[in-house]
Amino acid sequence: MNYLPIFIDIKQQPCLVVGGGDIAYRKINLLLKADAAVTCVSKECCDGIVQLVQSNKITHIEKAFEATDINSQILIVSATDDSTLNAHVSELAKSANIPVNVVDSPALCSFVMPSIVDRSPIVIAISSAGKAPVLARLIRAKLESTIPHAYGKLAELAGNFRDQVKAKFNNIEDRRYFWEKTFSGIVAEKVFSGKVDEAKADLQAQLDGSSDSEVGEVYLVGGGPGDPDLLTFKALRLMQQADVILYDRLVSKEVMELVRRDAELIYVGKERDNHTVAQGDINQLLVDLAKQGRRVCRLKGGDPFIFGRGGEEIETLAEN
């Protein structure tokens, strides 16, 4: 690694941004997201910075940068189009042991600004060590499209129960198992579906010992035409958290490569006039596995209701 990835607490801490253009504005907004106390030094500033000043979100000092401006700052960003000034700011900051970032000049930086996927309090940072920032942004875009926004709410929920879980489970391995089950089970699914209050009640019931832990879950997932890139994000998530996968002939090998590695795989056939497993037996198997407390993914090629008999399976599960 060229850089050590760390997260710094800058809440209400003095941070300096040198420059008043659009790039400086973006860096200021990033610092404000971390609740920093931002001071901007520049002779002129863009409309965005003016609005921040008018709303009392930052302090603006309308003048040229001076060496004394770095005093008492814990972090500095130089975002000007003056390379000589940027180098001067960098030299001063490094001499004072203050972390400094100079936009588009990795050699002048003591830290780099990563591309960020924000699911607060979950935050993912991606860096190319300043060598390929566009590539880092492309990677961020891929992550943005695959990580549900509700992960932030799930993390908040877990944080609210952390002390209770720690008190209930003295062994760290027991706590880890509890959280792994929580983050891949019905509590997480309810959060992802916007049912946060129900998820909270379920989690409390689990800790109180009043929930039925033996009841499993069954997900009916359509594998689409066989191209894994066409799977929905939810389908992929359910495939990767299931303990057992029941799949048929129409599910492609490429799609099967995406299921959880340690899942139990059960092939149930489904060829014309030659069903390896009869539909009635499949229905009953789904019920039996769920009653064992397993998380089951019934993975069907194509649309499970048009090309499969998903309706029958749902009816059987509902009856049981």
Image (spheres, rainbow, N blue to C red):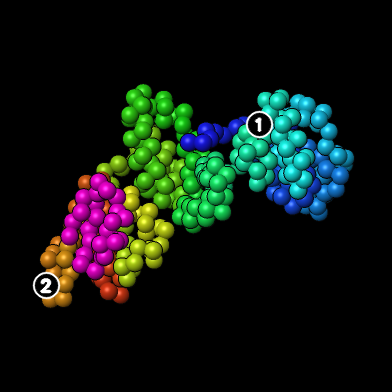
Residue 284 against residue 176 in the figure, above or below = below
Q: Position of residue 255 (x, y in %)?
A: 30, 61
Q: Which residue is drawn at 33% across and 49% down?
A: 241
Task: Please give left or right for residue 230 compared with residue 70 in the image.
Answer: left
Q: Can residue 218 be seen in the rendering of this structure?
A: no
Q: Residue at x 48, y 36 (%)?
A: 1
Badge 2 amino acid? Asn
Q: Distance between the residues labelled 2 and 1?
A: 68 Å
Crowdedness of circle 2 by 10 Å Cα count: few (<14), some, many (20+)?
few
Secondary structure found at label 2: loop
Q: Position of residue 256 (x, y in %)?
A: 27, 58
Decide whether residue 101 is among the magenta residues: no
Q: Position of residue 50 (x, y in %)?
A: 82, 49
Residue 93 against residue 146 in the figure, above or below = above
> Which quadrant would residue 58 be assigned to in this image?
top right
> Which quadrant would residue 222 be assigned to in this image?
bottom left
Q: Which of marks 2 and 1 is in front?
A: 1
Q: Which of 16 and 310 is in front in this view?
A: 16
Q: Position of residue 102 (x, y in %)?
A: 68, 41
Crowdedness of circle 1 by 10 Å Cα count: few (<14), some, many (20+)?
some
Q: Mark 2 points at which residue?
A: 274
Question: Which range is magenta?
Answer: 242-267
Q: Can residue 237 be seen in the rendering of this structure?
A: yes
Decide whether residue 258 is among the magenta residues: yes
Q: Residue at x 33, y 51 (%)?
A: 240
Q: Mark 1 points at which residue?
A: 99
Secondary structure found at label 1: loop
Badge 1 amino acid? Pro
Q: Nearer the viewer, residue 141 or 212?
A: 141
Task: Please give left or right for residue 236 compared with residue 85 in the image.
Answer: left
